[in-house]
Image (tube, rainbow, N blue to C red):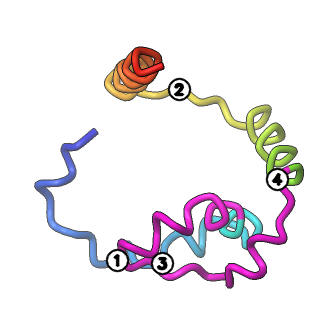
Amino acid sequence: MWQNLSKPILNNNFNKYKKELTKTKIDYIEKICIFEMKPFGYEPESKWKKLKKIEMSKMEKFHQQELKTYVYEPRNSVAENMQAKKRFYQHLR
């Protein structure tokens, strides 16, 4: 999962998400991640005023549709990491 850290930054990878994601998907991602994005220098495409108007029920409906469309099959290392985090957070309760 961390193997790309030693590789150089891809110059042609800038704003690639704009070609691959719809405006709706970008808005949903930004609504969820906006407060984590800003400290890392990522400016959202949409203003917070617009993003906060997005209803969570719409995002949940979209999420449920995507779960039916895409099969999530993480690599073993990712699945193991997710399980380790799950055990860790359960232990904190």
Q: Pointer 3 and pointer 2: residues touching (CB < 8 Å)? A: no
Foreground mark, 2 or 1, reads 2
Foreground mark, 1 or 4, reads 4
Hey, which quadrant is residue 46 in on the image? bottom right
Q: Indicate which disc, 4 or 3, sits on the residue closer to the N terminus.
A: 3
Q: Which residue is mark 4?
A: 56
Q: Amino acid at mark 4?
A: Met
Q: Residue at x 47, y 17 (%)?
A: 90
Give the structural element (helix, strand or loop) at label 1: helix
| Disc on res. 73 | 2
Q: Amino acid at mark 2?
A: Glu
Q: Which residues are magenta?
A: 28-56
Foreground mark, 4 or 3, reads 4
- Where is residue 31 shown, x and y percent of the image? 67, 65
Hey, which quadrant is residue 8 in on the image? bottom left
Cα–Cα span, label 3 and label 2: 26 Å
Give the structural element (helix, strand or loop) at label 2: loop
- Where is residue 32 shown, x and y percent of the image? 63, 58
| Disc on res. 55 | none
In the picture, measured across the screen, residue 38 lies left or right of residue 19, that is left
Note whether 26 is above or below 85 in the view shown. below
Name, please, the residue furthest toward the left: 6
Q: Residue at x 76, y 41 (%)?
A: 66
Q: Which residue is mark 3?
A: 15
Q: Indicate which disc, 2 or 4, sits on the residue closer to the N terminus.
A: 4
Cα–Cα span, label 2 and label 4: 26 Å
